[in-house]
Image: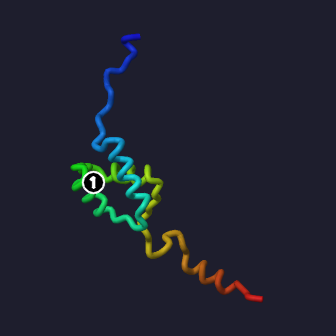
């Protein structure tokens, strides 16, 4: 059994569980989230600066916040097909 145990315990997180809970609650209570604002907040309040943006995205995910960069046009749309369908619609 001694040979099966792993000696690696993982790395210590930058945020304590209490701080992580505070950050997540703060995210849930805001209506608008600015990424750079969150980065600055974590640096100022907790002295945490992640190398990868993925760590910030994981905090958003833990807060159950879905984000996606908006697009001006639908990349899957076919303008000619949309125009053709528009011409076929009739109003009763």
Task: Residue lying at the far bottom in this picture: please name it.
Answer: 92
Q: Position of residue 11 (x, y in %)?
A: 29, 34
Query: Residue drawn 40% across and 67% down?
Result: 32
Q: Residue at x 27, y 58 (%)?
A: 41
Query: Which secondary structure lies at badge 1?
Result: helix
Task: Check the image and report above or below for 51 versus 4.
Answer: below
Depth order, front residue of 41/67: 41
Q: Which residue is mark 1?
A: 42
Q: Quadrant of residue 39?
A: bottom left
Measured from the top left, where is residue 66 in percent x and y?
Answer: 47, 59
Quadrant of residue 17 within the rendered picture: top left
Q: Residue furthest top?
A: 1
| Residue at position x 28%, y 43% in the image | 14
Q: Is residue 14 left or right of residue 32?
A: left
Q: Residue 42 location in percent, x, y?
A: 27, 54
- Number of residues whose C-alpha sits closer than 10 Å to that of mark 1, classed few (under 14), some (14–19) or many (20 or more): some
As displayed, is residue 41 above or below residue 82? above
51 left or right of 65? left
Measuring from the top left, give residue 57's x and y in whole percent. 38, 53
């Amino acid at each position: 059994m001694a040979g099966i145990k792993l000696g690696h315990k993982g790395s210590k997180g930058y945020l304590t569980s209490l701080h992580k809970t505070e950050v997540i609650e703060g995210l849930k209570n805001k209506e608008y989230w600015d990424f750079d604002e969150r980065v600055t907040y974590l640096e100022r309040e907790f002295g945490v600066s992640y190398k990868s943006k993925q760590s910030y995205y994981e905090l958003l995910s833990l807060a159950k916040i879905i984000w996606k960069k908006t697009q001006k046009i639908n990349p899957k749309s076919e303008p000619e097909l949309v125009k053709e369908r528009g011409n076929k619609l009739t109003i009763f």
